Image (tube, helix red, strand yellow):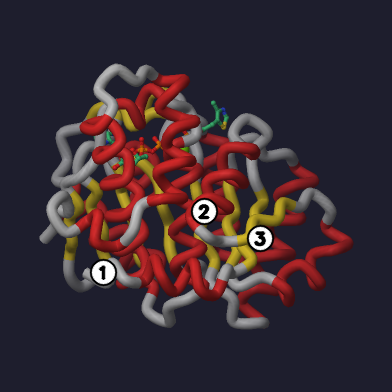
């Protein structure tokens, strides 16, 4: 586990281009900034080429998609591939809304992505597995998440992160798990979106998307866990603002005692 990748993010301050959703855009920008990356959001397709050239990586978040935005997503994804910039796809609610699933599959057929980061309901839907997603939330299913994550990674030739109480990560060959976290993440809308863009920040400074996915997922989940342990009185609102402080202040050594993964 390359926890010291956090220092590379802070040292290089990579620009992360985000096609964000309008619900959590500010959380995503602040979380990226706090951890040491440089966020930029864009809604205009005409600036796509300049934006992609400037960026170290790209996050495409389907959270509040429109037809116009899907054109922008396709343009940015294609350009990112052309300029060798890693793309992270966050397939918000594809497990619950058929239109979104069709759109996500269409985008994935148009350009390759380095990493897909979603909850279990979203990853199962992309992989074609049976699951009962619940809006933006993972919902319930009885499938084996190791198999679902691994086979979805194989299907799309990329790294897949299925986040949740345990985060399951696969490159299609092996499966890794992160056991850190806190249930307060579930109470704060935007936790998954922040994670996806932080994964992109790590992918910008590391040529190995599997290693970047594992390091980013561990650091995000363990940061929330340490915060919840240090300040047990926090609720969903205060957790969100304190999370920014912790993303900013924690050092790699702070994870020595707390990190749980295999
Ligand atoms: N029940 C839980 N217990 C601990 N951590 C959780 C739990 N659910 C989600 N997380 C953490 O919350 C973060 C966001 O993941 P998740 O909630 O699955 O995404 P989304 O918001 O897209 O559904 C991840 O870091 C994950 O580890
Ligand atoms: C509530 C909502 N509606 C559309 S996008 C969105 C935010 C999803 O955020 P997250 O997946 O990070 O919880
Ligand atoms: Mg989500």
Of the two numbered discs 3 and 1 on the same chain, state the one appearing first in sequence: 3
Quarter of the figure with the C terminus: bottom left
The relative height of residue 260 versus residue 108 in the rendered view (above or below) is: above
Q: Is residue 123 left or right of residue 93?
A: left
Name the residue carrying label 3: 17
Name the residue carrying label 1: 172
Image quarter of residue 4: bottom left
Q: Is residue 242 left or right of residue 147?
A: right
Element assignment for label 1? loop
Residue 238 vs residue 213, the one in the foreground: 238
- Tell me which residue sits at (24%, 48%) in the image: 167
Image quarter of residue 169: bottom left
Residue 22 vs residue 205, the one in the foreground: 205
Distance Cα–Cα, label 1 vs label 2? 22 Å
* Marks 3 and 1 in Cβ contact (< 8 Å): no
Crowd class of label 3 (few under 14; some 14 to 19; many from 20; radius 10 Å): many
Crowd class of label 2 (few under 14; some 14 to 19; many from 20; radius 10 Å): many
Of the two numbered discs 1 and 2 on the same chain, state the one appearing first in sequence: 1
Q: Is residue 25 visible?
A: yes
Give the percent coordinates (x, y) of residue 135: 45, 24
The relative height of residue 94 versus residue 206 in the rendered view (above or below) is: above
Element assignment for label 2? helix
Q: Where on the image, by quarter, is ligand 3?
A: top left
């Amino acid at each position: 586990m390359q926890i010291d990748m956090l220092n590379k993010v802070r040292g290089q301050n990579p620009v992360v281009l985000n096609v964000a959703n309008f619900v959590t855009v500010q959380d995503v920008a602040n979380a990226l900034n706090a951890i040491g990356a440089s966020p930029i959001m864009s809604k205009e397709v005409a600036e796509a080429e300049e934006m992609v050239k400037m960026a170290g990586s790209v996050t495409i978040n389907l959270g509040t998609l429109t037809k116009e935005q899907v054109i922008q997503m396709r343009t940015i994804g294609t350009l990112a591939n052309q300029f060798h910039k890693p793309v992270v796809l966050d397939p918000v609610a594809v497990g619950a809304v058929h239109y979104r699933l069709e759109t996500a599959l269409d985008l994935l057929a148009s350009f390759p992505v380095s990493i897909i980061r979603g909850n279990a309901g979203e990853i199962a839907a992309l992989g074609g597995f049976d699951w009962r997603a619940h809006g933006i939330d993972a919902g319930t299913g009885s499938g084996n998440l190791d198999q679902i994550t691994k086979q979805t990674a194989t299907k799309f030739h990329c790294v897949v992160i299925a986040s949740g109480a345990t985060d399951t990560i696969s490159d299609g060959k092996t499966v890794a798990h992160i056991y850190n976290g806190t249930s307060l993440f579930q109470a704060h809308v935007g936790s998954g979106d922040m994670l996806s863009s932080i994964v992109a920040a790590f992918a910008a400074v590391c040529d190995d998307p599997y290693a970047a996915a594992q390091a980013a997922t561990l650091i995000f989940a363990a940061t929330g866990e340490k915060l919840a342990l240090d300040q047990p009185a926090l609720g969903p609102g205060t957790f969100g603002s304190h999370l920014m402080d912790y993303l900013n202040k924690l050092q790699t050594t702070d994870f020595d005692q707390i990190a749980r993964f295999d």
